[in-house]
Image (tube, grey):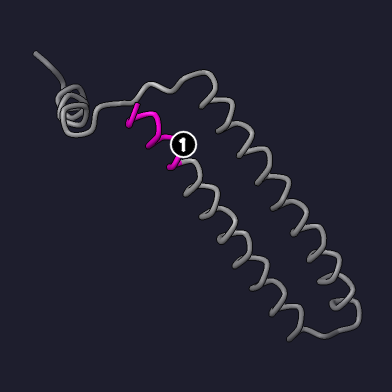
Amino acid sequence: MKTAYELAMERLNQAAPATKLTGAQKKQLAELDSTYAAKIAGREIALQDEIAKLAAAGDSEKVEALQQQLVKERKSLQAELEEKKEQIRRSAVAK
């Protein structure tokens, strides 16, 4: 007798079978992760420095604006990363 989990996994594999990635594709995904982690960290460092300066000056409106900008940029970069990763994954299916 199969568990509900096992049955669900079978249905999932029938609907969208798992794709096998080549070593080169795995390397591309890892490089993308590394590149975008660096991009995100760079933006965070730059904006955190500006936020700290403005907070010390007591400009809470600009601090909040920069914090929102940081969140938007982080989400944008993460979305861009996921899009590029998905392109690599789709190329694995096409082959």
Q: Position of residue 42 (x, y in %)?
A: 78, 54
What main secondary structure does the magenta stretch of the protein show? helix
Residue reaching furthest to the front: 95
Residue 3 higher or lower than 44, as above or below: above
Q: Residue at x 17, y 30 (%)?
A: 8
Q: Residue at x 17, y 34 (%)?
A: 15
Residue reaching furthest to the top: 1
Q: Residue at x 68, y 42 (%)?
A: 35
Residue 65 higher or lower than 48, as above or below: below
Residue reaching furthest to the left: 1
Of 95 and 53, the residue lying toward us? 95
Q: Position of residue 46 (x, y in %)?
A: 82, 62
Left or right: 52 in relation to 64: right
Q: Which residue is mark 1?
A: 88
| Magenta-tinted stretch | 86-95
Q: Position of residue 65 (x, y in %)?
A: 69, 80
Q: Quadrant location of the C terminus? A: top left
Left or right: 50 in relation to 15: right
Element marked by disc 1: helix
Q: Quadrant location of the N terminus? A: top left
Left or right: 74 in relation to 38: left
On the image, which quarter does residue 58 sit in? bottom right
Kind of residue at disc 1:
Ile
Q: Residue at x 43, y 23 (%)?
A: 21
Left or right: 86 in relation to 76: left
* Residue 1 sits inside the magenta stretch: no
